[in-house]
């Protein structure tokens, strides 16, 4: 409703004069009823009626002819609980308002291109309190998907093609967050995502003719594809025959693992948590070797199990089974397979659920010598026997020379290569990432993590608010331990109270791709995210190692979430799934046989 400066209704915000007059009348009536001012000579009775304070932490997200206002409750609710909130956006003599019971409030019917000053007030049974500090925002106008990029050239490589392009002339009104490059030959399509030109499409067949194009995406979706250009991938002359026989690795077109194209919010605040040790920064050739080692079943004692057998790309590099099958096909691991995305953003870098490994490098070799997983225990000859086996295969001598400069195969080099490949598994293309990229501001309060995202539903944004907001501010406090944007575990986290009396201190994987990585917890006891949310809502058990963030007074946390809020948390966590990482050919199997 438009407010053209008219007097506000009695049920809304009372002017100072009206409120004071009403209080004076009420005070006089009460005093008369108690004999005040009468012949008895009794003193007047003081009456105190309190309204709420101003809401806090206001932020504004502009939309099409609308502005969404997010805020925290006031520090003081007055003499009674806050019953409603009112939002006001003013431009010149025009004020547009909206009411609701919680944050955020959307003020609509605004004029695109006009800057509004917006504020929020809280009301209780005694009236409306003062307005919050105002913030400014400008509705964006009608938004659409980006236009088509201009494809400049397609350069053939060995089983690959490099696409160079210029951005589209029109972005549609929302920032472009990524590009998709695709090459098609008949029924075969190979595609990859990136954030800038050029983009290299892998997995093509040498000698085949492909039509390649590129499209741009914003938070509103993908735009049209560019015009297509033809390309015929060329065979390589420098890849050794043994490497080409067993793998798709191309020595002439090295996959760019070290130059990840990440959003702006993967800045120093995120890389401060990078657990990469000095001397093992990701190198394209070493990470390529790590990819081969990760997928090669010949690393197991009987050629039946690879690292990827327990860490499936399509399942967020975890295992859909509660416990993974060992090399003998009959034995099972004692813990659920951990997801690997964003494994690098956890300091100090201790690995496994019980943190028994000091680094990713050390962790990488442990399944190999495990008597159940890959079988190279002391009785089978240990790492020395595995190295002798790899030396006999031939193609590993070429790969180690390619990666390290000499053909020497060692446990340390294997650990370095696997760790580099694992650290390249950075998740940054989920729906949450796409939306957050459009609102991220390093200088804004909490880097705008509290702002509603334009590509999420109302339910998903409610779940986002619960996840990001502390318990004392009306949220569930999840982000205090699971740190966005990587959603990796805070290094100072302790036990989550899964069992009463717990003394172990656990590590957990990043929550990116969490809907893909069921079942959950170290022992896989929960089958669904709904069960996980129910546990954190009312199932935490006390124990010596329980994290303080999960305590409530002398007991364990009891959130008491409504069914709709529990469902909203689940809906939000599903927006963390990164389908691009789950299908990116850079992280798929390079093995031919």
Image (cartoon, rainbow, N blue to C red):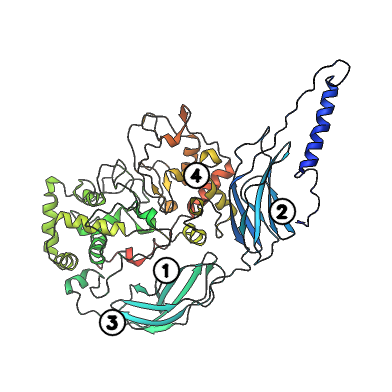
Kindly indicate the quadrant of the structure image that contains residue 238: bottom left
Left or right: residue 84 versus residue 559 is: right
| Outermost residue, right side | 39
Dot placed on the residue nearer the N-terminal end, 1 or 3: 1
User: Would residue 306 be seen by someone viewing this image from the given angle?
Assistant: no
Q: Nearer the viewer, residue 59 or 578?
A: 59
Q: Are marks 2 and 3 in contact (CB under 8 Å)?
A: no
Left or right: residue 107 versus residue 446 is: right
Dot placed on the residue nearer the N-terminal end, 1 or 2: 2
Determine the secondary structure under disc 2: strand
Q: Which mark is residue 97?
A: 2
Q: Which residue is mark 1?
A: 195
Kindly indicate the quadrant of the structure image that contains residue 162: bottom left
Instruction: Look at the image and tell me in which quarter the N terminus lies.
Output: bottom right
Q: Which mark is residue 530?
A: 4
Distance from disc 4 to disc 2, alpha carbons, whole Å, reads: 37 Å
- 4 vs 1, front mark: 1
User: Where is 396 relative to 373, above or below?
Assistant: below
Determine the secondary structure under disc 3: loop
Q: Nearer the viewer, residue 427 or 210?
A: 427
Distance from disc 2 to disc 3, alpha carbons, whole Å, reads: 63 Å
User: Would residue 228 be seen by someone viewing this image from the given angle?
Assistant: yes
| Outermost residue, top side | 40
Q: Which residue is mark 3?
A: 234
Distance from disc 4 to disc 3, alpha carbons, whole Å, reads: 50 Å
């Amino acid at each position: 409703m438009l407010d053209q400066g008219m007097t506000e209704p009695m049920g809304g915000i009372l002017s100072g004069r009206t409120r004071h007059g009403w209080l004076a009348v009420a005070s006089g009536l009460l005093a008369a009823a108690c004999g005040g001012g009468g012949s008895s000579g009794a003193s007047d009775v003081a009456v105190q009626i309190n309204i709420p304070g101003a809401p806090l932490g206001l932020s504004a997200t502009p939309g099409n002819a609308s502005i969404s206002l997010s805020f925290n409750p006031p520090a003081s609710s007055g003499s009674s609980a806050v019953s409603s909130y009112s939002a006001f956006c003013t431009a010149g003599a025009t004020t547009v308002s909206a009411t609701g019971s919680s944050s955020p409030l959307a003020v609509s019917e605004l004029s695109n291109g006009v800057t509004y000053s917006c504020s929020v007030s809280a009301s209780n049974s005694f009236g409306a309190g003062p307005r919050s500090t105002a913030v400014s925002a400008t509705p964006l106008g009608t938004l659409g998907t980006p236009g088509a990029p201009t494809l400049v050239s397609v350069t053939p490589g060995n089983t690959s093609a490099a696409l160079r392009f210029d951005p589209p002339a029109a972005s549609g009104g929302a920032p472009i967050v990524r590009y998709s490059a695709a090459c098609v030959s008949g029924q075969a399509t190979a595609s990859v995502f990136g954030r800038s030109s050029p983009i290299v499409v892998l997995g093509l067949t040498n000698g085949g003719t492909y039509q390649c194009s590129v499209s741009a995406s914003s938070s509103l979706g993908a735009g049209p594809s560019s015009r297509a250009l033809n390309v015929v991938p060329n065979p390589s002359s420098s890849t050794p025959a043994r490497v080409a026989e067993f793998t798709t690795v191309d020595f002439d077109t090295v996959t760019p693992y070290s130059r990840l194209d990440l959003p702006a919010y993967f800045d120093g605040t995120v890389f401060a948590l990078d657990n990469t040790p000095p001397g093992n920064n990701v190198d394209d050739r070493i990470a390529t070797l790590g990819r081969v080692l990760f997928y090669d079943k010949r690393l197991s004692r009987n050629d039946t199990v690879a690292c990827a057998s327990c860490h499936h790309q399509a399942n967020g590099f975890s295992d859909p089974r509660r416990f993974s099958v060992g090399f003998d096909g009959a034995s099972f691991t004692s813990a659920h397979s951990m997801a690997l995305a964003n494994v690098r953003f956890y300091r100090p870098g201790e690995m496994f659920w019980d943190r028994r490994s000091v680094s990713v490098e050390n962790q990488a070799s442990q399944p190999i010598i495990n008597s159940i997983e890959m079988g190279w225990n002391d009785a089978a000859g240990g790492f020395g026997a595995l190295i002798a086996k790899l030396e006999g295969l031939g193609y590993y001598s070429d790969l180690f020379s390619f990666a390290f400069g000499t053909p020497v195969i060692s446990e340390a080099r294997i650990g370095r290569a696997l760790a580099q490949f694992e650290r390249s598994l950075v998740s940054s293309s989920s729906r949450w990432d796409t939306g957050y990229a459009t609102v991220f501001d390093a200088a804004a309060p909490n880097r705008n993590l509290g702002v509603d995202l334009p590509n999420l539903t109302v339910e998903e944004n409610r779940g986002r608010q619960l996840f990001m907001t502390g318990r004392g501010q009306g949220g569930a406090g999840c982000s205090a331990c699971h740190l966005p944007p990587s959603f990796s575990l805070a290094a100072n986290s302790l036990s989550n109270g899964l069992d009463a009396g717990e003394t172990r201190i656990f590590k957990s994987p990043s929550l990116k791709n969490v809907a893909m990585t069921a079942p959950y917890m170290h022992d896989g006891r929960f089958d669904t995210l709904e069960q996980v949310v129910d546990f954190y809502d009312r199932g935490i058990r006390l124990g010596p190692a329980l994290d303080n963030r999960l305590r409530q007074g002398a007991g364990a946390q009891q959130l008491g979430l409504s069914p709709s809020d529990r469902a909203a948390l689940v809906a939000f966590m599903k927006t963390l799934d990164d389908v691009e990482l789950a299908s990116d050919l850079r992280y798929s199997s390079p093995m031919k046989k």
